[in-house]
Image (spheres, rainbow, N blue to C red):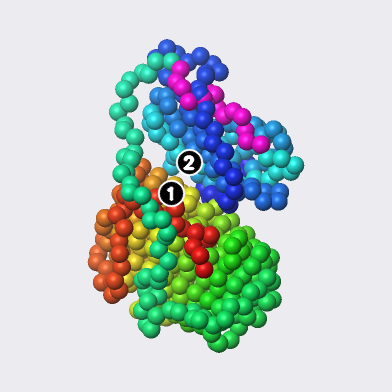
Amino acid sequence: MLLSRRRLAVAGGTVALICLATALVTPPATAAAGCRVGYTVTSQWGGGFGADISITNLGDPLSSWQLRWSFTAGQTVTQGWNAGYSQSGSTVTATNAGYNGSLATNAGTAIGFNGTWSGSNPVPSSFSLNGVTCTGSVTGTPSATPTQSPSPTPTTSPPPTQPQTGLVGWATQGGGTSGGGNASATTVTSASALTTAAAGTNAAVIRVSGTINCTGMLRIGSNKTILGNSGATIAGCGLNVSNASNVIIRNLTFRNWDDDAINVQYSTRVWIDHNTLSNGYDGAIDVKRASDYVTISWNRVFGHDKTMLLGHSDDNAAEDRGRLRVTYHHNYFDGTNQRHPRVRFGNPVHVYNNFYRSVGGYGVASTEGAGVLVEGNYFENTGDPFHLGEGDSGPGTLVARNNFFSGSGSGQTGGSVASIPYSYSLDTASNVKSIVTNGAGAGRISV
């Protein structure tokens, strides 16, 4: 059995499936049953693929559920999120997690998985929910008018035609962040070439082209801009910004890293922007060990567990207190599990205008005396959007304001947070979902 809250996917073709509901076993006259399923292949690569599944219950409220379908071309599920997965032959069963088993009438949830394929990858032709074939209609007579209303549908304004591209936040402080500036660009296509080009403290603009397959961590020196050309991917390894300053990393896709995708330690003035990260071992973007003046913006993370850690240890207060000042804005936390971010010591840490979609564990955790301002974010199907303390770590403070909640908990706040020293423009929280989904991730900007 494959059991995971984590969500895995990549970018590719989309196939929508709208289904009806015909009962395999006739329910009692007082029971109504029906469901609708949407199946989307979000990415596909040689031998592997990612898929998202939306489930809507059209019948009487459910306290638990199992979704079942069959593959016709030998595909297998290797890892999933927001449900427990088992497979017997071609038949796959997804069972609700502890936090998404209850589905009111017209309520829905989202799950997903990574899988393997060979030869072809056709979309399943039929799904059943608790034994009822999903076709988009209802059988039986509703037992009662549902007492729970569906989650509110926000009124959204059209997103900007081009996402914001300028630097905002903590990386504008302490002298600002310009990376390699106007240095002539060098294009690299291998790990060794990237490591060589990024060494030292000379100003350099480095363009990554194609897919770099690697292991471990590639060291990035000071005064560097690392830019991804169209489709540029770093697979199997990560970038280590260590004892450096004035670094920019933009427009790259990271997958299957064996340590962190991006690690920032003992470093200042770093901007990490418009990257896509999925399916790695440890942190997607971790900042620690006295780092300061960092902005993490417009990134999309999916198919991953430990997303963004700020401060690596409860025992590192002497080094970290008064530092670890980071801005997180317009990031897309797409079905991930925890650390969005998990904060120690930093104050103020600014978390604004991010979109949290079906986060399995928790959104933001403020611990060990940190101070976190959480404002203008959109939380969708996220039971624990923010809280104080985490695991063995003591609480910090957290101020939340002007956030939007759809099918989500209300969060835990407490204490006060230091003032934000820089200027910024706050998008209306109800518009953040459309703005971020249209603008976050690699391939959304011209660099």
Would you say residue 345 is visible in this rendering?
no
- Camera-side residue: 43 or 363? 43
Magenta span contains residue 124: yes
Which of the numbered marks, if any, corresponds to residue 357?
A: 1
Count neighbours of disc 2 (C-alpha within 10 A) and say few if under 14, some if 14 to 19, many if 20 or more: many
Q: Whole-percent x and y of residue 339? A: 45, 60
User: Splitting the image into 4 quarters, where does residue 154 fall?
Assistant: top left
On screen, residue 45 above or below 184:
above
Q: Whole-percent x and y of residue 227? A: 55, 71
Q: Main secondary structure of the magenta part?
A: loop
On screen, residue 346 above or below 351:
below
Quadrant housing the N terminus: top right
- Mark positioned earlier in the residue sequence (2 or 1): 2
Which residue is rendered at x = 28% and y = 75% of the image? 421
The kind of residue on which mark 2 rests is Ala
- Camera-side residue: 120 or 324? 120
Would you say residue 334 is visible in this rendering?
yes
Which residue is rendered at x = 57% and y = 51% of the image? 11
Magenta span contains residue 105: no
Q: Whole-percent x and y of residue 305? A: 52, 56
On screen, residue 380 above or below 371:
above
SS of the residue under disc 2: strand
Label 2 to label 1: alpha-carbon separation: 9 Å
SS of the residue under disc 1: strand
State the extent of the magenta-drawn residues as a range. 122-139
Which residue is rendered at x = 66% and y = 36% of the image? 122
Q: Whole-percent x and y of residue 399? A: 27, 61
The kind of residue on which mark 1 rests is Arg
Horizontally, is 41 left or right of 379 in the view?
Answer: right
Tell me whether the residue at label 2 lies in contact with that at label 1, contact meaning CB atoms closer than 8 angstroms: yes
Q: Which residue is mark 2?
A: 110
